[in-house]
Image (tube, helix red, strand yellow):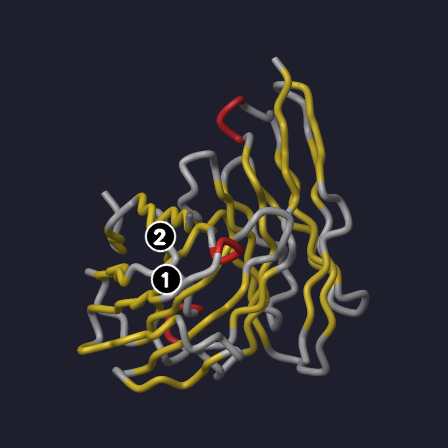
Amino acid sequence: ETGVTQTPRHLVMGMTNKKSLKCEQHLGHNAMYWYKQSAKKPLELMFVYNFKEQTENNSVPSRFSPECPNSSHLFLHLHTLQPEDSALYLCASSHYSDSSGNTIYFGEGSWLTVV
Amino acid sequence: AQTVTQSQPEMSVQEAETVTLSCTYDTSESDYYLFWYKQPPSRQMILVIRQEAYKQQNATENRFSVNFQKAAKSFSLKISDSQLGDAAMYFCAYRRRNYGQNFVFGPGTRLSVLP
C-alpha cells in the first residue's frame, strides 16, 4: 500500500475527450506535484502546489489543467490532448518545510494513452 | 540552475556482485540534499538512500551505500551483493535546503541484474 494513491492506473482517451487524473496522499504533506515521464526523456516537473496554492508551472500547455482543492488531493484535468502527451503521469508529495530531509514520495503513476 | 547528470544510461551486474552507479550535479549552493530513487517495473519510485550535504559521512542503507564527494559534486550509488530485485531504473536527485519544492532529477540509469 502506498501513501500516495493515483487513479486511474491506466487511461486511454481520444484527442477530443475530457478526462481527469486523481491523486490522494495520506502522509500529512502539504506540497503536491505532477511529473510527466515519457520514454527516453528525463522526469519532467509539470506543476507544484504548496498549501493548495500553485507555486510552479513549468510551461505546461493549457490542455493540462491542475486543481488542488486541499493539501491531500490533486487533480490533473485533461482536454484536447495530443498523441505525444501519451506518458506516465506521476503524482508526488512532500513536506514543504525542511523537516526530515523533505523526501518526496511518489504514487504508482497513471499510464495515459492518447489515440 | 541546478542540474543532475547520470552518464550511464544502462548498466548490468551479475547477481551477487557489486555495481556502482554514477551521478554528478551542478550547484552553487553549499547546503542541500541528495537522493537516489529506484523505479522498478511496477513504476513506483521508491527512495533508496538520502545524503545531507553538510554531513561528511557517507550514507548507507543495508546493501546500498553512497560515495559523496562534495568538492567534485559527485554522488555515486554502490549496490553490494546485487539481487534480481534490484533491477530497475535508478534516479539521482538533488534538492536545495530550505527550498522544499525544488527536486531536480537526473535522466536515470537502467540497471539489469544477470542471474
Q: Looking at this rendering, what residue extends furthest in the front direction?
A: A16
Q: Residue B50: give x, y in percent of width and height.
A: 52, 57
Q: Give the quadrant of the N terminus of chain A.
A: top left
The residue at the point 49 percent across, 47 percent down is B48
Query: Which label's residue is closer to the chain start, 1 or 2?
Result: 2
Q: Residue B57: give x, y in percent of width and height.
A: 63, 59
Could you tell me the amino acid type at mark 1? Ala
Could you tell me the amino acid type at mark 2? Gly
Instruction: Pinpoint the chain carrying mark 2.
Output: A
User: Residue B9 falls in which quadrant of the image?
Assistant: top right
Instruction: Pinpoint the chain carrying mark 1.
Output: A
Dot 1, crowdedness within 10 Å: few (<14), some or many (≥20)?
many
The residue at the point 35 percent across, 84 percent down is A54
The residue at the point 53 percent across, 22 percent down is B84
> Height in image: B89 above or below A61?
above
Specify whether B84 is left or right of A73. Answer: right
Distance Cα–Cα, label 1 vs label 2: 26 Å
Q: Which mark is residue B24?
A: none
Q: Which mark is residue A14?
A: 2
The residue at the point 47 percent across, 51 percent down is A87
> Height in image: A49 above or below B45?
below
Q: Which type of secondary structure does the marked residue at label 2 adopt?
A: loop
User: Residue B73 falls in which quadrant of the image?
Assistant: bottom right
Q: Please state which of the two labelled residues, at mark 1 or mark 2, is closer to the viewer.
A: 2
Task: Give the camera-side residue of A58 and B63.
Answer: A58
Residue receiving disc 1: A92
Question: Are callouts 1 and 2 both on one chain?
Answer: yes
Task: Give the camera-side residue of A29 and A88.
Answer: A88
Q: Residue A51: give x, y in percent of width and height.
A: 27, 83
Q: Residue B62: give x, y in percent of width and height.
A: 50, 38
Number of callouts: 2
